């Protein structure tokens, strides 16, 4: 048996591994696979409409949806609805993040606080955000404020819980090493706690951002005067299923973009090290 030459492994030149060779193929597959799935969905949609599997009045064709989208773009209404929905989601979600992460950090560092507060936080997290709609309307009226309130209630409690759980799971050796280097409380928070918990927190942010985007649509159907949810509800009242599908497609596309944007936070080196625990 011929032994491999170990000296080749220690010199500067190394043979590219299989992962390097497959990289262009993987990139191509990552582009073609979603395009193929999208083409398949469009083909099934076209066939269902062509053979009248569902009533024409309740199942628009792809061409009708495109015409409805162009109609809304022409009047500029679709852009106003997108901006209105994004404003509500960003406002409520950012407010939940600003308040939820510090509270989760505080609770996570104290077993006494966890024992006292976690049952109540779990109780409110278990409530459907849509159950707050009657109170949101009675307290805040119609428009932006009830939708922002519902977004906040959707995201706040899951963010608190995920942050608290992440802090409680940090290995104690991290803090012992930080104390050996005489880190102050602020330095320990910035250089140890936050990088260690951010992978789990960012995963929670991706989930809660998706939920927030879903909830704002439901809120706008009931308590809104504009927005993508209102567009869907208005299309239903006008017996325009093409406008309903236009709203659904835009909501799905924006939801994917929001998820991709938040997932990019994982690429920061100070965050990625948290995976190596």
Image (tube, grey):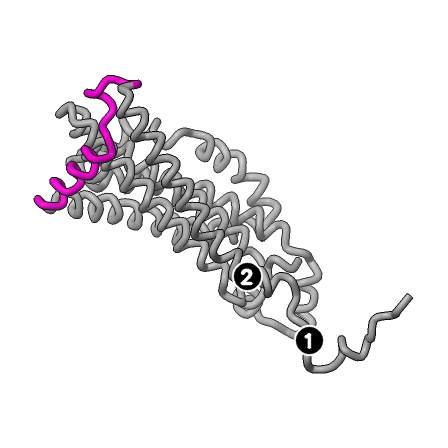
Instruction: Look at the numbered disc 2 and give the secondary structure of its residue.
Output: helix
Secondary structure under tag 1 reads loop
Residue 270, given in percent of the width and then of the height, sits at 53, 66
Q: Quick check: is 223 in the magenta stretch?
A: no
Q: Which residue is mark 2?
A: 23
Query: Which picture quadrant has residue 248?
Result: top left
Q: In the current view of this chain or complex, which residue is farthest to the right? A: 1
Residue 69 falls within the magenta-colored stretch: yes
Report the magenta residues as a range.
Answer: 53-75
| Residue 276 as seen in the image, left or right of residue 266 | right
* Residue situated furthest bottom in the rendering: 12
Residue 93: x percent and y percent? 35, 47
- Residue 108 image position (x, y, % from top left): 56, 50
Of pointers 2 and 1, the one earlier in the residue sequence: 1
Does the rendering let one see residue 246?
yes
Give the side of residue 46 with respect to residue 13, left or right. Answer: left
Q: Which residue is mark 1?
A: 14
User: How would you rate the neighbour count of disc 1 (Cα within 10 Å): few for under 14, some for 14-19, many for 20 or more?
Assistant: few
Residue nearest the observer in this picture, 67 or 25: 25
| Location of residue 226 with respect to 5 vertically, above or below | above
Q: Residue at x 56, y 45 (%)?
A: 113
The residue sitting at 15% across, 46% down in the picture is 80
Q: Is residue 138 visible?
A: no
Quarter of the image for residue 180 reads bottom right
């Amino acid at each position: 048996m011929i032994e491999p030459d170990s000296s080749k492994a220690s010199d500067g030149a190394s043979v590219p591994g299989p992962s390097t060779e497959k990289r262009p193929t993987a990139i191509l597959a990552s582009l073609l696979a979603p395009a193929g799935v999208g083409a398949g969905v469009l083909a099934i949609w076209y066939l269902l409409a062509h053979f009248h599997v569902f009533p024409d009045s309740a199942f628009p064709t792809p061409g009708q949806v495109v015409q409805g989208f162009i109609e809304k773009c022409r009047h500029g209404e679709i852009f106003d609805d997108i901006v209105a929905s994004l404003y509500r989601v960003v406002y409520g979600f950012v407010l939940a993040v600003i308040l939820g992460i510090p509270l989760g950090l505080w609770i996570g560092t104290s077993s006494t606080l966890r024992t006292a507060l976690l049952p109540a936080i779990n109780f409110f997290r278990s409530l459907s955000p849509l159950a707050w709609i009657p109170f949101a309307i009675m307290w805040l009226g119609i428009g932006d404020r009830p939708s922002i309130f519902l977004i906040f209630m959707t995201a706040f409690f899951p963010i608190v819980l995920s942050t608290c759980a992440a802090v409680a799971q940090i290995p104690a050796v991290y803090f012992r090493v930080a104390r050996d280097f005489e880190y102050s409380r602020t330095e320990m928070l910035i250089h140890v706690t936050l990088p260690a918990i951010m992978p789990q927190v960012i995963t929670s942010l991706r989930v809660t951002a998706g939920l927030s985007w879903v909830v704002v649509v439901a809120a706008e159907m009931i308590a809104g005067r504009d927005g993508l949810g209102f567009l869907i509800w208005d299309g239903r009242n006008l017996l325009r299923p093409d406008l309903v599908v236009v709203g659904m497609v835009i909501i799905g596309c924006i939801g994917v973009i929001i998820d991709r944007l938040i997932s990019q936070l994982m690429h920061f080196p100070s965050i990625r090290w948290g995976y190596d625990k």
